[in-house]
Structure formats: C-alpha cells, structure tokens
Amino acid sequence: MAKKYSVAVVGATGMVGQKMFEVLLERNFPISDLKLLASSRSADTRIKGGGKEYVVEELAANSFEGVDFAFFSAGESISKEFAAEAVARGAIVIDNSNAFRMDQEIPLVVPEVNPESAFAHKGIIANPNCSTIQMVVALQPLQKAAGIKRVVAATYQSVSGAGKEAVEELYEQCRAVLDNSPVPTERIPHKGALKNYQLAFNCVPQIDVFVEDGYCKEEMKMIRETRKIMELPELPITSTTVRLPVVSGHSIALNVEFNQPLSADQARDILGKAPGIVIVDDPKQLAYPMPIDAENDDAVFVGRIRPDHSVKYGLNLWVVSDNIRKGAATNSIQIAELLINN
Amino acid sequence: MAKKYSVAVVGATGMVGQKMFEVLLERNFPISDLKLLASSRSADTRIKGGGKEYVVEELAANSFEGVDFAFFSAGESISKEFAAEAVARGAIVIDNSNAFRMDQEIPLVVPEVNPESAFAHKGIIANPNCSTIQMVVALQPLQKAAGIKRVVAATYQSVSGAGKEAVEELYEQCRAVLDNSPVPTERIPHKGALKNYQLAFNCVPQIDVFVEDGYCKEEMKMIRETRKIMELPELPITSTTVRLPVVSGHSIALNVEFNQPLSADQARDILGKAPGIVIVDDPKQLAYPMPIDAENDDAVFVGRIRPDHSVKYGLNLWVVSDNIRKGAATNSIQIAELLINN
C-alpha cells in the first residue's frame, strides 16, 4: 500500500484554505489524517468533503504534532509565528504567504518551472504570488527556446485575491450601483487602507501596499519572485498590477522580448507542449482565454500569441489562470506531490 | 459680435452624438443653428438642452445645406456615404468614425498634439480612436522631452466604447449574475460577432474585429494612428486592447522607453504643465487615476509615473480618460474650436 500522510491546512476557512481542502480531496492526495486549522474565531466551523465532516480546530503550536505536510494560507504573521513550530515538530511547511518567498534559504517553487529546487528545502517551501505563478509557467518554456531579454507585464486581477470579504463586497457594490443606493467601500485596495475605493464598474491600479519607486508590492513580487524562480537574477522585467471587478481569475498582458528569433507559431507549439499550459488561441473563432472560462481549472491558459514588431524579436501573449487554484491552492499541493513522488 | 456657426450632429441619438450635443452647449460653442441628425428610425426623437427642445431630423444629403460644421459619429458607412455630401455643400466635416483616419489627404487631429495639421484639411478632418487620443496626449510632451524609443500599451477599456446597448447589456448581465438568472450576451466583442461573451465579472481581450498577425483592429488603430498624429511613421509601438466591465473611462498601462534619460519626477513635471493633462499621482495618499473618477471630465489623467529599471531609460505610466468625452465628443469639438480661433 502506498504511503499516506498526515496533512494540516492552516487558514482552512479562508478562500485559499477552503480551496486547498477541495483540491486535496479532488486530487486524491494520499491523506491518512486531515486537520483543518484556523483562528479561534473560526474554530468549530464544520466543513464537509469526501463524504466526511471536518471540524475546524484552533491553530496552536502543538497542532502540528505528527503532521507530515502543513499547508499555510493564513497570512504573513501567522506563517512567521507558526511555520517554525510546525517544522520543529517534523512537518514540511508549504507556505502561501509572502513571509519566506525571498528568503535565500527557502525554495520558491512552481513545479512546472523549478521542481528541482524544492528538494533543497530545510522544512519550509514557499508558494509564489498568484500572478507570478501563471506568468512563469508561460515564460519558462519560451526562455528555454529563445532566451528572454525583457518582460513587460500588465495584470488584470480578480478580487478573490483580496479574500472572501472583498468578493462579497464587489457583489454588494454591484447591487448598490444597480439599485442607486450607497456603495460600501472597505476592502479595495485592501482592508484598513488610508482610502478605500469602489471596484464595481471601475478598475484600481494598486494591489497590496506601495513600496519603493512608486511600485506597489504586487508589482515587486512579480519582478523579484520571477527572477528567483527562473534563476535569472538580472532578468529585466517590469510590471503594472491592476485590480478589476472580476471575481475569479487573473489575466496578464505579457510583452516579451527575446534574444533569438521566435515566431508566434513556434511559441504556440512550444507552449502547447509545455506542462500545465492550455492554448486557447484562434482569432478566427474568437477564441482566447478569459477569466470566467478559467474558473475552477488548474491550467494556465495562453492565447493572443502574436508578433510584436516594435522590437527585433518580440511576442505578445495573454495569460489567464484561476488565481485561487493554480495561483495558490493547487500549486501548493503540487509542491507536496512533487516531494512525495520523488 | 463674434461669428456664429450653423452646426449639425450626425448620429445625434448615439452615445457620442448625445455627448457632442451636451459638450457643444457646455462649451458655449458659437452656434447660430443646430441640427440633430440621425437615421429614420431615430428621427422625431426630442432632445432637450440649453433651455430648448430639439427634434431629431432624418439624415439626408440636403441636411447639410448652409451647415458650417458637421460632426459625424454614426459609424463608418454613414461617414463614407454622407461626408462628401456635406463638404460639397460647404460644411467642414469632423468625423469620429474610422472611415478617413488613415487617409493621407485627411488630417487626423488631437488639438494638444498636432493642431497645425488641422489647417491642411480639404473639408474633412478625422477624429482619432478613443484610446489613441488619450495615449498621444500623454506621449507627445514626453517625446519632445526625451525622444520615444518604444511604446508598449495595454488597455483597460470601458463598455461605453461599444455603444449604448452594450452599456445596457453590461448592467443587465450584472443583474442576471447577481440574481442567478440567464445572462444575455449579444454585444461583446461586438454585435453580430461569431460568438458573444459575458463581460460582467469578466474581461475580454478583443476590441473590434481581428485583422492581421493576430491583432485586433483597436490595437492596429492605436499603432497606426499614433504614428500619424505624432508624425513618427516608424515609431516602435505595440498594443493589447482589453474590454472591462467598466461603464465609462478607458485606462492604459503605458510602458515607454526613451532615447534620453527622463526621471519620473521630470516626467511628472513636464506632463503637469502639458495641455489637457491632470496629474493624479501620490502613492502615499493612494492617489492615482481611476475610470470612475474620470467620468464626465475632459482631462487626460496621468498617474503611477515610475521608473522602469528593465531598460536604460524607461517609465511606466497609467493614463485614464473619459472615452466618450476627450476620446470622442470633446476632441471633435476642440478641433472645430481650433479652426474658429485661428
């Protein structure tokens, strides 16, 4: 009989945590025992799945006794407080927060891109930012084929990346606008921000807080994490990240300059054979990826592949994926599967 | 007493035509006589403004007898059929359709960018595409300051650019999604398309029909019209155009590479003094342009100005404007004002 593992999900009542639970069952992850952990506020929540009912337990250091894999998605501070506790008790932590991603000692892994780096872990493996994951899945095969000279990314990101309450708020905002009643604004750009904006029928060019040089943190994540994952520490890349009134699925307009010639047809062929990618690219049939079509799918969808004549060797691509699945939950679980299967 | 002019608006019941009527009154355009023209289907519609009621008349060749300025916004085929008729009767046509924009004999004018070219007209002056207008207003001062080497544009376009019925459909779609009822889809990417898609809670990476090389027409308009207006026939520029569930206001993530150094501060200063531009750019105050804030304003709003370290001399900018006003109606009327005032 194949080995089974004791698994914990930290932040089990959050958007990503719930999806982790679903994806673990869906993929038949070899589970001997599953603990759903959350803050005291969410403890005792009952969650059904796979013919069983699970009761959410309050997260504590000793929650990790006997746990093999702990999937964290409860924010940076929880990860900083509890990841080491889990590792000390023998668990491998796969952390979806920003806490450890740029730590040189900690692998930052997208299984389709840098699987080998996962095996160097010392207990913690970081799961990258959602928009980074789908971008590098598309970039890596092209890097191998023609060498990337420069990347310009502009994102079209859904509100699910800002959490369950932000999704609810978007629906409420839409209803309020349609009914001509006051529009609630508490969640965008983020909860507790100096100012909060209406997202319904609008777009907001800020994701996460502003950091340096006028960039917001999401933009810097895309830049720095991509360099780390692709092992191209000097990769010239810039990004603009924008929140849309879309519930699920991030899209990226990706402009890529190459060192060597690469036609749109060649890129389509290469990406079509690459792991984790589905090509949706037929202008004659008006076929291209869209966020509503990507929902609840693990693939990274690529379309609108076309030459960019403004540089010697350039392509434009449109890359869409479910940010809660491949961008968070699924990628985390794929990392654990990678360790199990090797 | 200052001279007054006989004015006609062709397509007066459409989204842009109605806005032209409003803007003409708002700006106190020196009107002696105002004719609102439309197809027989819309004839006899009554439109109120400036303390008067106007009755829409059916468009015919002889509608233009005695007209000084004819503002056309009723689509390409109407422009092709009637613009010459209007010119033959002595009118100056300012045409908002795609019919004449790339005609070498016909000026394509954004008053802040290439006012001088307007005076070379032979009866017809073309008003550029909406997303082109706001982009060139922002690019031209930077071109003068540091010389543009390359532009990568990704757009975030509102549905009002697709007409009144598309706006109505977006609202209906939102209501249907919220109520869990069937979602009507007839207007996006455009009416009569091979396939039509839901725009509510989605984004659609196609505007206008597909033309060559996998580009859609809106993308080619941005490329070709920008080169013509800025008189840079070889300007390296590429574009990705995307429709959002936003009612009013287009946004553009603009990445610009320069021939000479240009800091974000310098660009902010230059653009702040440039005609038609309002800077909204203070990350500490979470201040940046957003489409809902641009609605019903004639300015081109620029923010998120920051260095792009992926090239020697690069900047990112976020450019927002009301596509029906500066992107269409206001720019058309500014062209007429330019002729009157010189």
Image (tube, coloured by chain):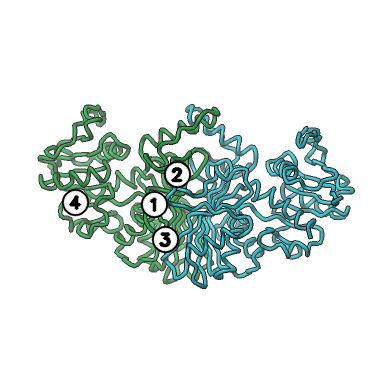
Chain colours: A cyan, B green
The residue indicated by pointer 4 is B124
Judging by the rendered image, the residue that carries numbered circle 3 is B238
Residue receiving disc 2: B291
Secondary structure type for disc 3: strand
Chain letter of the residue beneath label 3 in the structure image: B
Q: Are marks 4 and 3 on the same chain?
A: yes
In the depicted structure, whether residue B17 falls above or below residue B338: above
- Which percent across, then down, holds residue B18? 29, 36
Element on which disc 4 rests: strand
Q: Nearer the viewer, residue B116 or A293?
A: A293
Precedes in sequence: disc 1 or disc 3: 1
Question: Which residue is disc 1 drawn over?
Answer: B210
Which badge, 2 or 1, comes first in the chain's sequence?
Answer: 1
In the picture, which quadrant includes the C terminus of chain B? bottom left
Compared to A52, does B226 lie above or below? Answer: below
Rendering coords of residue B187 (x, y %): 40, 38
Quadrant location, the N terminus of chain B? top left
Marks 4/1 in contact by CB < 8 Å: the verdict is no
Task: Report the Cα–Cα distance between label 2 and label 1.
Answer: 26 Å
Kind of residue at disc 3: Thr
Q: Residue at x 54, y 27 (%)?
A: B179
Respond whether the residues carrying marks 2 and 3 are from the same subunit.
yes
